[in-house]
Image: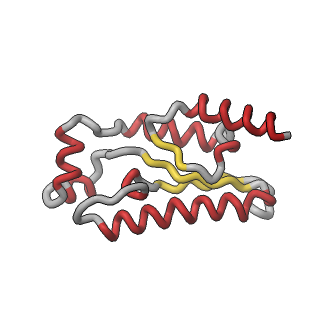
């Protein structure tokens, strides 16, 4: 990416990287670290045209979620409350970021329920006012 002078790194973090959950200390610590790593990559790679993002896709029904729901009540509650994220919505978010339209958000955490276009418009208008 550095040699090419462009690239996008999209790390799959979690809302668990932004708050504490009972019985999930290793997962929470790992996702928090991934968010910070994404921020740091964005800062260090920016001069080379490389952007980095952390995304929080919500709870997607995967094999890991199916195993975890049996012994982590918070996961079962999210599923019971209908908070499951459709895989198509997650891939749509990733495609949007990978297209380059979200480059002004590099270093940020983007959640599935964010209004991506509005975030980009706000970031670009702040940039214009600072120049």
Count of residue discs: 0
Q: Is residue 85 above or below residue 26?
A: above
Q: Residue at x 32, y 45 (%)?
A: 60
Q: Is residue 108 visible?
A: yes
Q: Position of residue 4 (x, y in %)?
A: 79, 58
Q: Residue at x 65, y 63 (%)?
A: 41
Q: Is residue 27 above or below residue 125?
A: below
The N terminus - image quarter: bottom right
The C terminus - image quarter: top right
Q: Is residue 4 visible?
A: no
Q: Residue at x 50, y 63 (%)?
A: 34
Q: Would residue 14 appear left or right of 3 to someone viewing this image?
A: left
Q: Would residue 46 appear left or right of 24 to someone viewing this image?
A: right
Q: Position of residue 48 (x, y in %)?
A: 79, 59
Q: Position of residue 49 (x, y in %)?
A: 77, 54
Q: Outermost residue, bottom direction?
A: 26
Q: Outermost residue, front direction?
A: 130
Q: Outermost residue, right direction?
A: 131
């Amino acid at each position: 990416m550095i040699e090419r002078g462009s690239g996008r790194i999209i790390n799959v973090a979690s809302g668990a990287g932004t708050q504490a959950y009972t019985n999930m200390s290793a997962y929470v610590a790992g996702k928090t670290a991934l968010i910070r790593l994404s921020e740091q990559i964005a800062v260090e790679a920016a001069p080379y045209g490389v952007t980095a993002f952390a995304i929080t896709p919500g709870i997607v029904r995967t094999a890991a979620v199916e195993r975890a729901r049996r012994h982590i009540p918070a996961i079962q509650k999210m599923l019971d409350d209908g908070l499951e994220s459709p895989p198509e919505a997650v891939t749509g978010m990733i495609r949007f970021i990978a297209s380059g339209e979200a480059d002004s958000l590099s270093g940020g955490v983007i959640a599935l329920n964010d209004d991506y276009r509005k975030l980009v418009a706000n970031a670009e208008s702040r940039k214009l006012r600072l120049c």
